[in-house]
Image: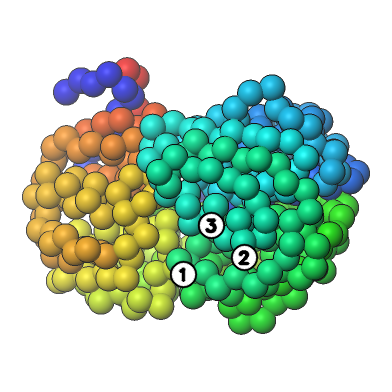
Amino acid sequence: MSGATPAFVASPGGRVAGEIRVPGDKSISHRAVMLAGIATGRTEITGFLDGEDCLATLAAMTAMGVRAERLAADQLRVDGAGRGGLHAPPGPLDLGNSGTAMRLLAGLLCGQAFDTVLVGDSSLMRRPMERVAAPLRRMGARIETSDGRPPLRIRGTPGLVGCQHELEVPSAQLKSAILLAALGAQGRTEVREPALTRDHTERMLAAFGVPVERHDRMVAVQGPVELRGCPIAVPGDFSSAAFFIVAGLIADGAPLLIRNVGVNPTRTGLLEILRLMGADIRVLDTRMAGGEPVADLEIHPGPLRGIEVPRALVSTAIDEFPILFAAAAIAEGETLVTGAGELRVKESDRIAVMAEGLQRLGVRVAVLPDGLRILGGPVEGGVVDSHGDHRVAMAFAVLAARAKAPVEIQDVANVQTSFPGFAATARRSGLLVEKRSA
Ligand code: S3P
């Protein structure tokens, strides 16, 4: 068992119990740095995710003249350049593995007075970008993709014009990119989405003093408008907590408490899905922090049963399918997921990659164009390849708690993009996960 990149070796058993915290929310951390950078005045960000994706956004903003000081690993002081105060970066902006950084920055940069080129790692360079370039072009932006993929070549075009957008894919990244472009555009920009997606941009724009009109699945802003710096408290990332929600359900143990988790209803579809599967998850002490609801989650172990996942819950659980598929592998009976074709264009093709890994561990899986059918049953030990996808790697590390023998998960370096310290947090929770260096 050896490989060129770091791996996890996760052993069966472990007693999951006690209390943990997870790092700051990735989506909210990206937005905080971008909005703080184009605001006037100072923004103090606490709970910032010190992960590679958000650090790529921070590096991009500082390369364009934003002044940011790291007060601690999870604390930043940003002195905004103002919406018109950014300058051309010295070279292409490298956004690593982060689709959110690339798509949101496309919106932020297309109306600037300078040109930019956006690039990323091999996974990001394969991801679809016409979906964001096309609606921005309707506002007057000049953006070239390379056969629909990065690099994105943006010819800065001041004087964008607001318009109405009807999105075909449910995507918070597209909605957010359009809203960021709208801040500097003339007139009203309206976005309608086909299903509810995370609304962190809308909430944070309001915190920065931007009037945001919202109704059902419609959001509109009137440009041009200035942002005012404000304090931002980033909650723990629900998508990182998700791994421990499932660990607490499926591993032997006592209740597990996960403190300070963002529970924005546009993110918590997994809770509803797991409850339909029979899970006992208690949401305690819900409070508001920085315009976002936050709570402590208490997870009680117990059996899960397979279900047909309601399609209406897919968009609010979009990042949680790797760990949901893992839960389905040990549930009693069959779980069917459909309507989740977007999983094929995430950091990896999460339908194909999860099916491959589950099959290697002896789980019976049928691959559908837009989902998976999984028959719960015994899970063997073995070697699985995460294909460089952070959430796939963490999902298998959790599933190993119920395997018959250790599971080696290869190519886990990208766990740093969203969850630095995952293996240590996993051990603190009681899981038997070791990280083996390259
Ligand atoms: C994100 C939106 C989602 C999600 C991604 C983060 C965001 O992507 O999968 O991890 O921060 O806006 P899509 O907009 O492509 O659905």
For the N terminus, which image quadrant?
top left
Q: Mark 3, residues whose alpha carbon is within 10 Å: few (<14), some, or many (≥20)? A: some
Q: Nearer the viewer, residue 1 or 220?
A: 220
For this orientation, the residue located farthest to the bottom is 216
Q: Mark 1, residues whose alpha carbon is within 10 Å: few (<14), some, or many (≥20)? A: few
Residue where numbered disc 2 is placed? 199
Residue where numbered disc 1 is placed? 168
> Nearer the N terminus, badge 3 or badge 2?
3
Q: Which of 133 and 298 is in front in this view?
A: 133
Q: Are marks 2 and 1 in contact (CB under 8 Å)?
A: no
Foreground label between 1 and 3: 3
Q: In this view, does 436 lie to the left or right of 336?
A: right
- Distance, label 2 to label 1, CA atoms, is 17 Å
Check disc 2 and give the amino acid type: Asp
Percent across and percent down for residue 28 are 63, 52
Q: Which of 158 and 369 is in front in this view?
A: 158
Check disc 1 and give the amino acid type: Glu
Q: Do the residues labelled 1 and 3 touch (CB within 8 Å)?
A: no
Q: Which residue is drawn at 90% across and 44% down?
A: 41
Q: What element carries label 3?
A: helix
Q: Which residue is drawn at 41% across and 74% down?
A: 313
Does the rendering let one see residue 30? no
Q: Residue at x 10, y 58 (%)?
A: 364
Q: What is the quadrant of residue 334 in the picture?
A: bottom left
136 shown above or below 43? below
Image disc number at residue 269:
none
Q: In this view, does 131 lie to the left or right of 191?
A: left
Q: In this view, does 130 lie to the left or right of 305?
A: right
Percent across and percent down for residue 127 are 41, 45
Residue where numbered disc 3 is placed? 134
